[in-house]
Amino acid sequence: MYLQLEDIDTVTVDFTAHCNAMCGNCSRNLGGAEVNPRMPLEHMSPTTFKKLFSEKVLDNINQIVFNGSYGDPLISPYMFECLDYLKEHKKPVIHIHTNGGMRQPKFFSELALKLKDFPFPSHVVFSIDGLEDTNHLYRRNVRWNKVMDNAQAFLDAGGLGRWRMLVFEHNAHQLEQAEQLSAKMGFAKFEINGGHTFTAMNSMVNNAIEKFKANKKEQARTIKYDTSKLDNIKRLKDLKKTHGSLDKGFAKSCITCKWQKKRKIQVSHMGEVFPCCYMLSDRYPRDVDSPFAKENSKVEWLNVNDMPLEVILDSPFFTDELPDSWGSEDRFKICEVTCGEV
């Protein structure tokens, strides 16, 4: 059994496939230059949202995370409508992740006021990767001044905010300055996003880079991570050292599911239910020939538009197939990469 409804603490929602940014390693685009054509370019509808968060579900869960494997939740025109729906029922803690570069300060001020209706520590995570001269290098098409104006409006209206920074070689020297700016603006917390990406995995640890098109003329751009800040680097190095290669290490590692341990599930903007964001990231693959994509395509992902969440969690995939696979040779490669232990 993966998780039953009464076990779930957090539901993470991929609220939309739309975004103002074109980040190099994001699942929603190809090479940082064009939108992934395999991805349905839609918002989660209020109807789907309400089917997902029935009164029975809301009576059991504690937190809702609006995150984005394929889009930025604050692009959606339905955010306030869905928050109002939750306000009328049991109020969970709300977490919203955004690059902060869309809409106007007035919207962010109103968002801060709406979140006051929800339990502490309901908040917004602003993903800001450096300062004015660096943030746009990875978060392409995001305008610095707009991010700063929107974040300040949110904080000034009493919103609880966290600044999360993805660390690359080109912005690592700005960590202290960024933390100081976050405190000056009124952010409650400044934190480093470890940058746990499949690019880093595939680069065999020692050369963690992202190569993507600088524009539609297909000029190449390369961004290098600060590997000291990458998640799971020590684990990967130990696997490689102990077993001679990552492939052999993954094959011998045991699976301890991070999301199951934290009692979390993931739901796509189309209403499909996944055990984690990692499996969702290959639902609409950029590379259909990748081993992750091939495994993902074999699963019939069930949808809350067709049946209640509790019925989906009681389906064979969640009760037997997935948890049984962790101890077999047929386990998902994505589980090896993200949750395998030495």
Image: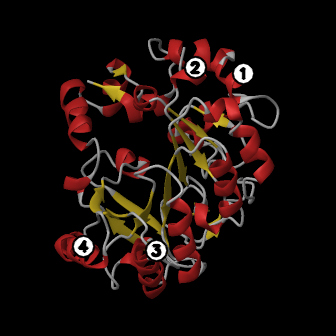
Q: Position of residue 211 (x, y in %)?
A: 43, 64
- What is the spatial separation of the Cα atoms under label 3 and label 2, in whole angstroms? 36 Å
Label placed on residue 311:
1
Q: Which residue is mark 3?
A: 154
- Residue 324 lies, in percent from the top left, at 52, 12
Q: Amino acid at mark 4?
A: Ala
Mark identifier at residue 244: none
Q: Nearer the viewer, residue 131 or 45?
A: 45
Circle nearer the viewer, 1 or 3: 3
Name the element at disc 1.
helix
Residue type beneath disc 2: Gln
Amino acid at pointer 1: Val
Sequence order check: which comes first, mark 1 or mark 4? 4
Q: Are marks 1 and 2 in contact (CB under 8 Å)?
A: no
Give the percent coordinates (x, y) of residue 341.
30, 25
The residue wearing badge 2 is: 4
In the rendered structure, the answer to whether residue 283 lies left or right of residue 307 reads left
**Which structural element holds mark 3?**
helix
